[in-house]
Amino acid sequence: MQSSKWLALVALLSGLCIPLALAPFNFWPLIFVGVAGFFWLSFRAASARQALWLGWLFGVSQYGLGVSWIYSSMQTVDTPIWLGVLLTAGFCLALALLPLFQLWFFQRFLRRLPLALMLIAPLWWVVNEWVREWLFTGMPWLFAGYALSDTPMAQNAALFGVYGLSLMVAVISAGMLRVGYRLQRQQRRSAQITALSVVGLLGLSTLVGLVQPASDWTQATGTLKVAAIQSNVDQRRKWTSAQQQPTLDFYSQVLRDLPDIDLMLWPEAAMTLRPEQIPTYMADLQRLGTERDMALLTGVVTLDAGRYYNAILGYGMASGEYRKQHLVPFGEYLPLEKYLRGTIAFFDLPTSVMYPAAQPQRPIRAELNGQPYFIAPVICYEATYPDLVRRLARDSDLIAVISNDAWFGDSIAPHQHLQITRMRAIENGRDLLRATQNGVSALIDADGRVLQHSEQFVAAKLTGELTLRTGLTPFQRLPSAFIPWLCLSLLIVLSLMARRKNRPLAAD
């Protein structure tokens, strides 16, 4: 009984280490502790039933803190406290089923394979992160690789993406655990060799990041004077008729205040009126942008053939429309609309009737001094999908991300979202401009460094220079799922080989 309580405590503490290693806490060394703790539990679970329990506890603490912002999103539309708590708890408990399955499957089928700790466990960790990207439309949040964002090791994402970083974290964590095992068995020589290997991997990845940052894979072709605009409109008022004119007036004033800008970016659904409802206003944007040789991108809601789209439109020296491809379930569409519509205010918002783009989307074309350049447009949650951004950024000179993080209030989500967005800049070796409704807006260079950022809950006009870049990083040359597919393939091959030899071995 005492042992079971100790294992349960380790599961809870290890799960907490994952979000604590990420923004806004940024205690990044804890990511190795959390992943190593999960691996330790995978081997200590004495039965499939105990593995289910420990995996679920790990997930409860991981997601209980890591996605606690779900409650804040409910409160932006005044959902009753009891209902917000109930829905948030239900969501976190459901997500905890993912590490439950991960630990149970490892305990049941993988832990006695050859190299179970140093190879099988890290491969299986990455496969499960990848599953979270697409299962039930996806929840690509809290990946281990994001914890390295503020270290030189993050630059390796230009080589193999965030999944490659997660694999590196998992291998190092497994090595740390193996050192502990060897010391416990008084096998000092083996422990020393493993420790040197771990330090060597840390040192090598750090050295590669320092010597070959992401920006070295691409070539600068020019600079732009850019502006990211943050309106700070309260989410409760945003879609009201009383807020429509003040919103238009705010952006008109921004244009008067910033006459000397090459590219201006407004947030997601910056104006709640559709373009055809304010034709004179939009015509003025086009005229002013053309006169100033300025490209303007703004988030809007468009209507086509009776369907609403969350979109980005280009004005002035930018042209074209980008429609959001990956919608947020329950936020932009209702999976069970017939049953949920009308139950609570959260499900009756104007934004919960959107449709995804019917066709693959292309970068937006812009011009400066008669020369064309291309912008990879990304809307909010799409920034969490590596391959979606990769496909757009391959043919672009700059990445532009618009978002409405006002949904999350004063929670950890806006900081997590910014950290995730920074990784997209590194993977693609492209500078990135980010405009949000109430923060955090930012100018980010190709190495993922935040050059400027806004404070939250204030109106802001971030201005500065970003670099246009061409060329491909190694990450862009292959699908972002290349690392997970490689991990899954190795797992299958190793499992078949072990079965064929009929010689399952102990974990360590």
Image (cartoon, grey):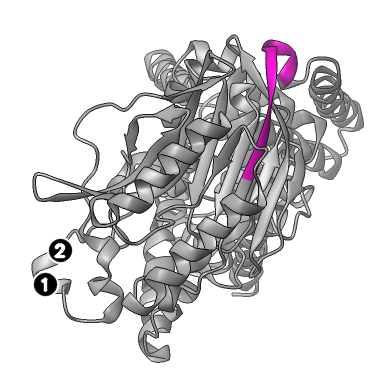
Residue position marked by numbered label 2 in the rendering: 336
Q: Is residue 432 left or right of residue 212?
A: left
Residue position marked by numbered label 1 in the rendering: 339
**Residue 506 visible to the viewer:** no
Residue 21 vs 295, above or below: the answer is: below
The residue shown at (34%, 30%) is: 320
The front one of 241 and 198 is 241
For label 2, the crowd category at 10 Å Cα-Cα, with few meaning under 14, some 14 to 19 and many 20 or more, is few
Q: Is residue 172 left or right of residue 189?
A: left
Query: Which quadrant of the figure contains the N terminus?
Result: bottom right
Give the residue type at disc 2. Answer: Leu
For label 1, the crowd category at 10 Å Cα-Cα, with few meaning under 14, some 14 to 19 and many 20 or more, is few
**Residue 158 visible to the viewer:** yes
Q: Is residue 408 magenta?
A: no
Callout 2–callout 1 Cβ contact below 8 Å: yes
Residue 305 point in image, percent of width and height:
9, 44
Residue 313 point in image, percent of width and height:
37, 39
The residue shown at (38%, 14%) is: 500
Q: Is residue 220 magenta?
A: yes
The front one of 359 and 211 is 359
Give the residue type at disc 1. Answer: Tyr
Query: Which quadrant of the figure contains the C terminus?
Result: top right
What separation in Å lies between label 2 and label 1 (alpha carbons)?
6 Å
Q: Secondary structure at mark 2?
A: loop
The front one of 198 and 439 is 439
The rendered magenta stretch, by its main secondary structure, is classed as strand
Residue 56 point in image, percent of width and height:
46, 62
Tell me where the magenta segment starts and ends, as one range: 215-227
Where on the picture, by quarter, is residue 27? bottom right
